[in-house]
Amino acid sequence: DQQVKQNSPSLSVQEGRISILNCDYTNSMFDYFLWYKKYPAEGPTFLISISSIKDKNEDGRFTVFLNKSAKHLSLHIVPSQPGDSAVYFCAASPSSGNTPLVFGKGTRLSVIA
Amino acid sequence: DVKVTQSSRYLVKRTGEKVFLECVQDMDHENMFWYRQDPGLGLRLIYFSYDVKMKEKGDIPEGYSVSREKKERFSLILESASTNQTSMYLCASSPPYQGFQGEQFFGPGTRLTVL
């Protein structure tokens, strides 16, 4: 059973507009969440994270929002740029115990010029 | 600068061959991981290791084994390669953060094709 779900396999956005990538989780023990970005033929790179004590974390054009009651998080990219075109993975982890990150299946973002 | 390297970017092997994928990290990280990435299936964890000589099965360990003889090196072994093991293989490492898995650092990946 998938504990981290990214229900949109792909998303297309016009350059300069907002991109919103969504992620849902089922495990209430998760309290740390990360987003990774992956270009073809490269390994994923860390983008931004949020812990469950916050509901928002911002880093430049990237903002992650966390709604714990809905078990939902989203990544906002404003403004979107063609270089943002990549696969984005959501990942989650509990803060206690030594367990690996659980990844979603990814969303492919295409930013059209 | 943090670095995870993988021995090959592209590899082509025959069915039944024994395949070794090597991963080295220079960050003195305790934790190391092997994933495979397939279209529509995301990143699936094969094996991970919290320390030298230690290994734990991930979600899809069947057909694979691992070796961690030194802290910086984590090897993935396909005992008898099969065509369904054609995939992108990604290695990652992370430090332990009070018991929870902090940010993982990924290598560039090995695209393995089994004919």
Image: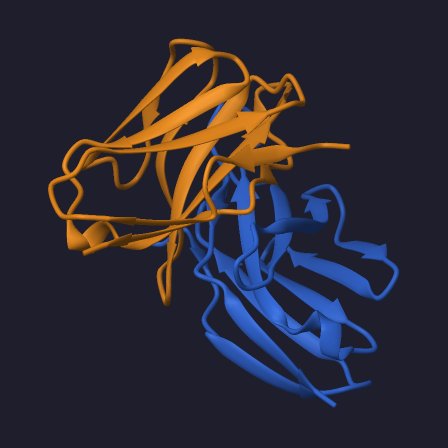
Chain colours: A blue, B orange
User: Looking at this rendering, what residue extends furthest in the left direction?
Assistant: B16
Horizontal and vertical percent for residue B33? 45, 32
Closest to the observer, A58 or B45:
B45
In this rendering, the count of numbered labels is 0
Q: Residue at x 16, y 38 (%)?
A: B17
Between A50 and B26, the one lying in front of the other is B26
Q: Position of residue B39 (x, y in %)?
A: 37, 66
Residue drawn at (77%, 32%), measured in percent from left and top?
B1
Seen in the image, is A21 located left or right of residue A58? left
Give the left or right position of residue A110, taking residue A29 as reference. Answer: right
Q: Position of residue A69 (x, y in %)?
A: 59, 56
Q: Residue at x 45, y 42 (%)?
A: B8
In the picture, which quadrant includes the C terminus of chain B? bottom left
Q: Residue at x 64, y 18 (%)?
A: B98
x then y, percent, for residue B28: 64, 16
- Taking the image as drawn, is residue A11 in sight? yes
* Furthest residue in direction right, as rendered: A60
Q: Is residue B45 found left or right of A34 in the rendered image? A: left
Q: Quadrant of residue A70?
A: bottom right
Question: Is residue B37 placed above or below B52 in the rendered structure?
Answer: below
